[in-house]
Amino acid sequence: MSEGKRKVFIIIVLLLVVVFGVGQFFSYSNLAQPSGSSSQNNSEVATQVIDYSPLSPASSTPIEKGSCFASSIAAPYRSDAWRCSVGNAISDPCFEIQGSTSTLACGQNPAGTDTSSTFTLQLTKPLPTPTVISGGVPSNWAWLVELGDGTICSPYTGTRPFTATGEIATYACNSAQPGEDMIFGDLNNSSSVWIAEIGSLSTSTKQFPPVIAASATVPIFAVWQ
């Protein structure tokens, strides 16, 4: 091989090495950062604080007749939310529907698409005088809570469970996960990501008041006020 051809051959080899090396580098980079990945964990996403506006029920929504006897316990800071009864059943909260003085929207679930509990309440008597709560409206209240894992929790509107050490359950949760039956205490909104103390009560003994069997601090995805 002549000297000129040898130099051309060496140059071609070097170019192939450089190209191959760069290709390997980008291949490694793509493996290290999967497509669509994000450095931000769901638990770090700011909690959505939603000022709920009740929707007019669809024409297919069941209609029940009943009356309201007090302001809502679940949504006590809303003047348009009520505690109502249909026969022996109590529904709380039921919301006034804009433009209507004779019907309310009850059992609404803005956190999901399940409308099986939703119904229109046709009032059989006028609404009572609303209860006025003194002391201002706290910023960390909610009548519906969605935890970071999708669990939905709503306020206790009757007797609240309490523990042997004084913790009071404030929200009941529908989680299928063991140990996520309720929220204890107030919602913590000291940062953009609200958090809740969830847990369950021990059923292994007949001790009363019971003790907390399990507890954890979890992020809150959204709250409805």
Image (tube, rainbow, N blue to C red):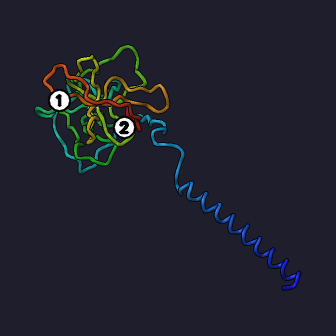
Q: Can residue 10 be seen in the rendering of this structure?
A: yes
- Amino acid type at circle 1 is Thr
Considering every residue shown, the one lying at the far right of the view is 3
Q: Which quarter of the figure has residue 209?
A: top left
Q: Residues within 10 Å of mark 2 (few under 14, many from 20)?
A: many
Q: Which mark is residue 118?
A: none
Q: Which quarter of the figure has residue 140?
A: top left
Q: Position of residue 110 (x, y in %)?
A: 34, 42
Q: Which corner quadrant holds the N terminus?
A: bottom right
Where does label 1 land, which residue? 203
Q: Residues within 10 Å of mark 1 (few under 14, many from 20)?
A: few
Which SS class for mark 2?
strand
Which SS class for mark 1?
loop
- Amino acid type at circle 2 is Leu
Q: Position of residue 2 (x, y in %)?
A: 87, 85
Q: Position of residue 59 (x, y in %)?
A: 26, 50
Kindly report which numbered mark, 1 or 2, lies closer to the viewer in this rendering: 1
Residue at x 21% of width, y 28% of height = 202
Q: Which mark is residue 147?
A: 2
Residue at x 33% of width, y 17% of height = 133
